[in-house]
């Protein structure tokens, strides 16, 4: 994940900071408890495409 891109992206639901998760290739937002997928190196920043984070994924 490009660091510059990660620095400017925010969660569309909560406007919170995003964290890149290497193992799932997703962007996590701990404020909204959502994980946004990355497809072909493009973050899909749509709430409808995000999945809810599970308790075990919260650090």
Image: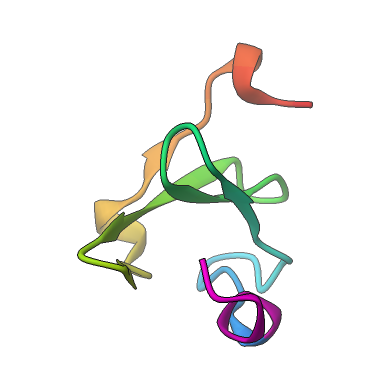
Q: Position of residue 27 (x, y in %)?
A: 52, 54
Which residue in the rendered view is the most extreme toward the right? 59
Residue at the spot x=66%, y=74% of the render?
Answer: 15
Horizontal and vertical percent position of residue 51: 37, 39
Q: Is residue 57 above or below residue 4?
A: above
Magenta stretch contains residue 2: yes
- For residue 21, what is the image quadrant? top right
Q: Position of residue 4 (x, y in %)?
A: 64, 86
Numbered disc total: 0
What color scheme is it?
rainbow
At x 65% / y 61%, what residue is drawn?
18
Left or right relative to 16: residue 42: left
Would you place residue 16 above or below residue 55 in this image? below
Q: Seen in the image, is 40 located left or right of residue 47?
A: left
- Drawn side of residue 57 relative to residue 52, left or right: right
* Relative depth, front residue between 16 and 20: 20
Q: Which residues are magenta?
A: 1-7
Q: Which picture quadrant has residue 45?
A: bottom left
**Residue pictured at 56% horizontal, 83% vertical:** 5
Outermost left residue: 40
């Amino acid at each position: 994940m490009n660091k510059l891109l990660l620095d400017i992206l925010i969660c569309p639901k909560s406007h919170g900071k995003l964290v890149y998760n290497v193992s799932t290739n997703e962007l996590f937002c701990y404020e909204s408890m959502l994980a946004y997928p990355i497809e072909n190196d493009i973050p899909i920043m749509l709430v409808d495409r995000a999945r809810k984070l599970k308790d075990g994924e919260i650090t």
